[in-house]
Every structure is written in structure tokens, then in C-alpha cells.
Amino acid sequence: MFTRILAVVLVTILMLTVGFGAIGAFAMRQERTNARLEALTGQAREIAWLAARDSTSPFSFFSAGTGTPGSYLEHKAREVYDAYGAYIMVVDRYGRVMDNLSTALREDPDFATSLNRDELGNELSRVVQGEEVILRTQLQGASIFTVGVPYVRSEQVQGAVLIRTPAQQVEGSVWEFILPVAGIALGVFLIATCILSLYLRRVMKPLRTLTEAADAMAGGDFSVRVQPDNASPEVGALASAFNTMSEKLADIERGRREFVANVSHELRSPLTSINGFVQGMEDGTIPPEDHGKYLHIVAEEGQRLSKLVGELLSLSRLEREDAALERTQFDLCELMRRAVIRRVNDLEAKRIEPTFDFDPDPCPVNADRDRIEEVVINLMDNAIKFTPEGGRIALRVRQEKKKVIAEVQDNGIGIREEDLPRLFDRFFTADRAHTSGKGTGLGLSICQRVMEMHGERIWVSHTSEGEGTTFSFSLPAA
């Protein structure tokens, strides 16, 4: 992974370096060309000024001697030729032409033979009208720069100075710019490679740690935690999220193991009782006259086992991804009355008198009727289970704007404060309820799951040890 990232980034840097290097080389060459042309124009102006100083003959500068304008002009012409390899031509208004063609033929025959005076007519006509020209033209397949400057005496144009030179003399060779730019680009690339390599190694180190931790987690080890040193804020945030995920997965794994252990225990307990009593009746340990009593216990344990399996199947169906609700509109008050009727025998057995406080009545809600009835019955069962004989259970319904709140309150033994955080956990039962036949600890988990599917919640709104408990849940008003 590190190698691939480094390769991609380096290729990108290389492409950018080459691109900017090419732009830089072009800009440098253009700058040099402009500077050389400006210098060549300055030389042409100086030759024109020297030619204009000779009042007798504009061509006396080719005569021998020293100290005269002509001798200096001849020196200047030689200097320009040495610097540019240029063909220099001076034309006066009488059409007389003087040039250094003989020098050009001797020094650079190919360039000299390619020159043609007749092609200069257009440039000359512009120069003798007082205009300075700088032109780039093609001559026999070669690029030529032409600089033209008029020379003036007594505010009148007396003639023209034309300088022609191969473009390469002005622009220079492409390699003159490519090689230094390439050297600079290579240096930048190498420095960037080193810096980037060190940076990526520093960045990738915590990522490798995360990868190793993820592999360990995939193998079932949810205890791994990542503490990246000197990590960037982004990688630090990723490590924090990873640790949070690891903790949650560890909690899920603990819950799964507890669930399996609890299911095994809850299934084993009634099965052990059933097997023990049946074996006792078969081998004569339990006398025939006691068979009826123990068969009644076996039947109760069978019912307990059936209830546990039923609740497990119900919870499993509720937690499936494709579990769906069948929402309808129904009267919540009527549903709670029916739940009381279904448990009337249990209420009468403990001489519990239920009370009702419904406002409004009827109170229509939009929910899955069967699921909500299951919630109410589970809450009723809990209330009956933990309410002493002669106690009371109150059922209430009230509407708050677009929500309907339902409550089931008892005056039983209550719930200890330390038990509240785990109240809706699977198989969790408070110590007071940890007696055989008191329940499976799945009822409240089923209630919570049903309310989550509705997008609503269930909560303990009032509880005090020894003074009863109130369970509440919300539903959308129809």
C-alpha cells in the first residue's frame, strides 16, 4: 500500500515537474530572445548614429584609418558580426548599398549564400519611412531575424541599417535551457521524493498499526486498541473511531456469550427438572401416589420451557432485518382494557384491583396492534409478578400534542437504582426476581425492540425501591 501511494504521488510530482520545467525553459528562452533582440536593435541604432555623423559620404566608415567615424563604424560592424554572425547592410537614399557580405561569405558561407537583397525591399521601404522593424522570417527553410533602423541627418531620413542574423544566434539552442532546467527539476524531484517518503512513512505507520489491529479483530480478538504516536489529526480521529468500534464489538461479543450462556442455563433448568422427575417416577424413586404432584411440576416446567422458546423465537423474529410492522389505526384504551381482561385470573388470584385513567377515551393511535398488545401484556405480567397480594395496578393514557403516552404503574417491590442501566438487557432479572419460575428476563427486551421498530421509546418514568414502578411508552397519535 505504501509503495503504491508513493509511486502515484511521485509520478504526479514528476509530471508536474516536467510540465513546469518545460514552461520555465520556454519562458527563459523567450526572455533571452527578447533581451538579445533588444541588444541587437541597440547595435543597429548605434551603427545608424555613426553613419549619420559622416556628412560627406555615408560609406567612408569602410575606409582605412583610425579616429574617424568610419573606422569606428567598421569596428562596430565587426563586433556585431562576432556577437551575432549577422549580415549588416547600410543603404542610403540614393540606393547605394554597403555591406559585410565578403566577411559573411568567409565566415559562414551557407548563411551568406542564402541571403537575397531583393527580399529586403518591403523592410527597406518601411525603414526609410522612419519606422524601426524587428521581423522573423523563413529563408530557405531557416528562421531569420531582421532588425531595421533608419539613420537620420538634419531631421531627414538619409538611409537604413538592416541587420539579418540566424534565429539560433538570438534564441540560442534549446538544450542551453533544457539541461539546466532539467538539472533543477531533477534536484527538486529528488528532494521531494525524500521528503515525501519520510512523510508517508510517518503517516502510514499508524495506518499499518490500524491494519494489524483490524486483522486481529477479524480473528476474533476484540481487545485490541490503537494508540498511534505522532499521528495527524485525521489519523488520530480514525484511531479513536476504531477504538470505539472495537469497544462496541467487544460489548456485542460479551452480550452474545452471555446470551448463549443464559439460554443454555434457562433451557437446562426446566429440562433437568423434567428429566429428574420423569426418571424418578420410572425407577420408583418417586412412589406412585406422588406421581400426580410431580407430573404437575413437570407440566409447569414444560410450560416454562415453551414460554422461553416462544420468547426467543419472538425476539429473533423482531431482530431480523426484514421484520416489518403492520400499522393500523386502533384505540389504545380499548387494547389496554382487553390486556387486563386476558390477565383477570392472575389479578384475582392476588386480589389486585386495576384502575384506569384514560384521557382522552377513546385514544386512537397509529401502530402495529399485535406488537403493542404484546408490550402491554409483558408490562402487565411484570406488574402482577412484583405486586404483593391486595396491591394495586394503574393503567393510564394521556395525549401530549402528537404523541400518546401509555403507563403501567404498580406499588410492588420496585427496582434498585443500580439495576436500572441493565433493565432492558436480555435475560437480566433483578435479584428479587432470581427465583425459579419468576421469568426469563426477555420480556422487557422484546418491549424495547418493538418500540424501536416503531421509532418510539419505552422507559421507567418512576421507580423507588419498595414503593413500586411505572413503565411508560410513547406512540404516534392517529
Image (tube, rainbow, N blue to C red):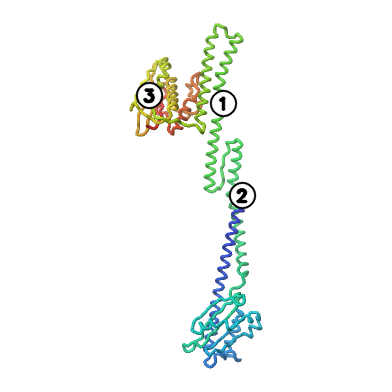
Image coords of residue 296 (percent x, y): 52, 12
Q: Quick one: label 3, few (<14), some, or many (20+) residues within 10 Å?
A: some
Q: Residue furthest top?
A: 289
Q: Which mark is residue 2?
A: 2
Residue that mark 3 sits on: 334
- Nearest to viewer (mark 1 / mark 3): 3
Secondary structure beneath disc 3? helix
Residue 287 position by quadrant: top right
How many C-alpha atoms fall within 10 Å of the one at disc 2: few (<14), some, or many (≥20)?
some
Q: Quadrant of residue 279?
A: top right
Give the percent coordinates (x, y) of residue 139: 60, 77
- Residue closest to the eye, 89 or 252: 89
Marks 2/3: CA distance?
A: 67 Å
Q: Are marks 2 and 3 in contact (CB under 8 Å)?
A: no
Quadrant of the image occupied by residue 395: top left
Foreground of the two, 218 or 173: 173
| Residue type pointed to by label 3 | Glu
State the SS at label 2: helix
Q: Disc 1 or 3, which lies upstream in sequence?
A: 1
- Is residue 125 depicted above or below 20 in this figure? below
Q: Viewed as shown, does residue 21 lie left or right of 460? A: right
Instruction: Identify the element where label 1 is drawn.
Output: helix
Amino acid type at image mark 2: Phe
Measure the C-alpha gap from mark 1 to mark 3: 40 Å
Q: Is residue 72 left or right of residue 425?
A: right
Confirm or deny contact between disc 1 and disc 3 (CB under 8 A). Answer: no
Numbered label attached to residue 261: 1
